[in-house]
Image (cartoon, coloured by chain):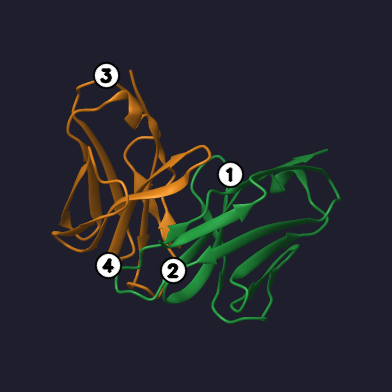
Chain colours: A orange, B green
Amino acid sequence: DVKVTQSSRYLVKRTGEKVFLECVQDMDHENMFWYRQDPGLGLRLIYFSYDVKMKEKGDIPEGYSVSREKKERFSLILESASTNQTSMYLCASSLMAGRDTQYFGPGTRLTVL
Amino acid sequence: EDKVVQSPLSLVVHEGDTVTLNCSYEVTNFRSLLWYKQEKKAPTFLFMLTSSGIEKKSGRLSSILDKKELFSILNITATQTGDSAIYLCAVLPSSNTGKLIFGQGTTLQVKP
């Protein structure tokens, strides 16, 4: 079974803090994705990566950056957290681009005060 | 602009009822449509539909795709309280990125 894990289930941070959210998958998947999920808006793609050190912007990249130094690990960084970044953050991975379903991690509920 | 629209956005039914969830899409270079179920944590994969008119079935859940009219339905028969969840529809375009386009989700509540 594919396993996607995220570093924290719940996180509370203050405005202006730098926040790291980490995602690890154990199935040697090529592609990894970061989404945020807000009520009424569904899942919105922030960034994705199709290879180590490769990244592409999704639909809402502003205020975020990512890092993929190893194939199994994809980090989402909030350089200076703001209250409008309070959300559920979901990481996903898939084996091959365009051919495979995405498998999701359990999510991190981030609150920025 | 590519988009996926789900309806209804929320639904309350009683155990034993049958429900139909809808997903329509306007996506350039469609490849496949996926359904996920999300309870309190990670969305879990239900179905991937690529061809029109072929029903996919798993227990009380079934789904079908109409590529001419650009929609899919997810049916749940004899609903149970454990079916309460957010149901997500997503479209996978033909691209090299594997990037999914999600609908807003349908929140289903099944009352005892």
Q: Quadrant of residue A99?
A: bottom left
Left or right side of A40 for A94? left
Is residue B96 or residue B84 the one in the foreground? B96
Marks 3/2 in contact by CB < 8 Å: the verdict is: no
Q: Amino acid at mark 2?
A: Leu
How far apart are labels 3 and 2 at the CA level? 36 Å
Task: Please tell me whether mark 4 sits on a helix, a strand or a loop.
Answer: loop
Asked if labels 2 and 1 share a chain, the reply is: yes
Q: Mark 1 Cα within 10 Å, few/some/many (few <14, many 20+)?
A: some
Chain of the residue under the numbered disc 2 shown in the image:
B
Marks 3/4 in contact by CB < 8 Å: the verdict is: no
Judging by the rendered image, the residue that carries numbered circle 3 is A14
Q: Amino acid at mark 1?
A: Glu
Q: Earlier in the sequence, mark 3 or mark 4?
A: 3
Asked if labels 4 and 2 share a chain, the reply is: no
Q: Which mark is residue A72?
A: none
- Mark 3 or 2: in front is 2
- Mark 3 or 4: in front is 3
Q: Which mark is residue B39?
A: 1
- Mark 4 or 2: in front is 2
Number of numbered markers: 4
Judging by the rendered image, the residue that carries numbered circle 2 is B92
